[in-house]
Image (cartoon, coloured by chain):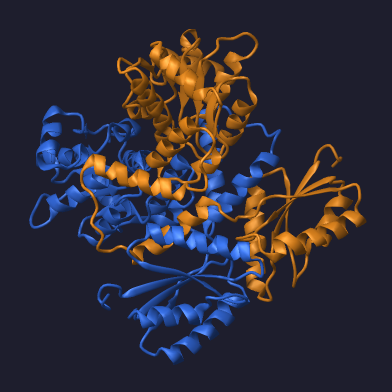
Chain colours: A orange, B blue
Amino acid sequence: MSVMDRPIGILIISHGSPRAEANRGFEALVARVASRLQPADVLPAFFSIVRPDIPDQVAAMASRGVRRILLLPYFLYSGQHVTVDIPALLDQCRNQFPDVALEVLPNLENDPVLEDLLVERLAPWAGEDEVFPQEGAAIEQQSYRIIQQQLADWASSQPDADQIVRRVIHATADLSFARTLRIHPQAVSRGIEALADGQPILCDVNMLKAGMTKIRNEILCAIDWPEVAALARADQSTRAAAAMTHLAPRLEGAIVAIGNAPTALWRILDLTRNGGPRPALVVGLPIGFVGAQQSKRALLESDLCYITNTNHRGGSPAAAAAVNVLALMAHERNPDV
Amino acid sequence: MSVMDRPIGILIISHGSPRAEANRGFEALVARVASRLQPADVLPAFFSIVRPDIPDQVAAMASRGVRRILLLPYFLYSGQHVTVDIPALLDQCRNQFPDVALEVLPNLENDPVLEDLLVERLAPWAGEDEVFPQEGAAIEQQSYRIIQQQLADWASSQPDADQIVRRVIHATADLSFARTLRIHPQAVSRGIEALADGQPILCDVNMLKAGMTKIRNEILCAIDWPEVAALARADQSTRAAAAMTHLAPRLEGAIVAIGNAPTALWRILDLTRNGGPRPALVVGLPIGFVGAQQSKRALLESDLCYITNTNHRGGSPAAAAAVNVLALMAHERNPDV
């Protein structure tokens, strides 16, 4: 393979254990990760005790023509190894391979997923006798209190955007949205304006339509329409994508909400290119292991106004929550909306 | 506080770093976890380098009357420290505090959440040029191939139950369901039978109803019915709970599906106790930080036939997927269903 074919290598670094099973388990983990990131060049490396170590793997990648290596320390916090010892090792590697760029990615420290994991693992032994509120408003208040507490370190500089983050987490019980949600600086103002203007919401699946319980605007979901099924058969796409093409005449100025199908988001990106209709806002939160993440990256890189996120998670509850909070904000500013 | 008030203590153990910020970060993490597990007694302990260490915290808990301590090693794999050094330390503690039971919980090794986290973090640098299938069946096939690959180590001894696990993960893109789903040994057969018998499905929210796209049976969701709103006001509960009371005359032999409200699941548990109506199956997957996990634990401990899970995650897409796969199985066995 040429340098162009594999410009980047990824090393996942573990401490290394005197216990062989532990090292084999780590190597198996990296192999599974690599299989999900194909065709990327992903290898394990041990910081110490056992081989292959970091210089071994940098040399192996360099010999294959890799010229940029990203290193992810599979460590739970930024201790001495991550902040001092690994950087020192990398300096040695840089001396040996001056034409290979080495970049260290953040380790796992402070990831809300880990906090969630601990709570989930320990919860069976805690709070057995706790009394829970049984009334809707009290439950919601307590949920937001918990979320607020968990996100103390995660507040952005956009209070409106933070409201969206909190509501999406409330709807999904998934704190990782605090890290993965991306909200265009104009998303809130444009979304509120479109709702106030009576623009329709075009969505991909009926589940999302059912979840937008705060919306008084027209909600269009064409996935079940017979003409859409015919269109999907004709162009060998999904019904969710064909539905977006079918609704294209309503796209100008509308809000698009996608909670399921990456193909619907790809289709919106196609339709809006090159002088196509311009939606006011695209809430793009398709879900799944096949293309969801990539379709959202394409949305981020487009010139559309977006609310989206950066991983394979998403879903109708998340997309519905994002649109619902815009409707609540619009209503707050103008009770007629 | 008496021994009865706080029978259990929980220690989360980190390696300990010469870098003070790293240790402070860990202590802050444990404080956040503890706040979510209130009123449980949760403390950090360092395996080495810094204090408080494990003997310090065992002594502190013992002096407060704790008589059972669970220790969760916050380590990424079962290396030398987890398998040899910490057990040796605990033997010393047992000699010093013979009336305190010390139990070690599994560390983070092999948790699918970590694999997911690595893939998510690294994906922006991988697979830029990958071509994705655009056609529904091909997307679904590729998704199931990825899930199958990821769950290679997680297959249960129940192939039917595994189908439910895979479909829930396909719907949610959340591999943690492989670890958290709990499927009663008779859940599949009873669910299929109830569907074949034409029993209705009682569900808590319209989003779940909209997601049960494979169902030909009657689906009842009463959350929006005016008489239910009045009932909820009268007994100061949620509309989701009141809806279950309102639908109680249809409960005998039915399938219950809950994808949102813990209060709906608590209500089902109340209604079915002491000679109340017996649903064929309860798909109990409410979501959220307030009571969801506890309501599901109560379902697991009840005498009902269940499909549920053990953490705060859940949701309408997960519940819909579980019921949909039962319908597909029923249809496979008898195409008239």
Which one is nearer the viewer's eye here, A158 or B235?
A158
Left or right of B262, for residue A99: right
Left or right of B114, for residue A41: right
Q: Position of residue A198 (x, y in %)?
A: 38, 11
Left or right of B121, for residue B73: left
The residue sitting at the bottom extreme is B95
Quadrant where the C terminus of chain B is found in the figure: top left
Q: Position of residue B112 (x, y in %)?
A: 52, 55
Instruction: In the rendered view, tell whether residue A43 sits above or below residue A179.
Output: below
Give the residue drawn at x 12%, y 56%: B273
Which one is nearer the viewer's eye here, B53 or B186?
B53
Left or right of A275, for residue B11: left
Instruction: In the rendered view, tell whether residue A162 sits above or below residue B277.
Output: above
Q: In the rendered image, is residue A195 in sight?
A: yes
Q: Position of residue B250 (x, y in %)?
A: 12, 40
Q: Position of residue A57 (x, y in %)?
A: 80, 58
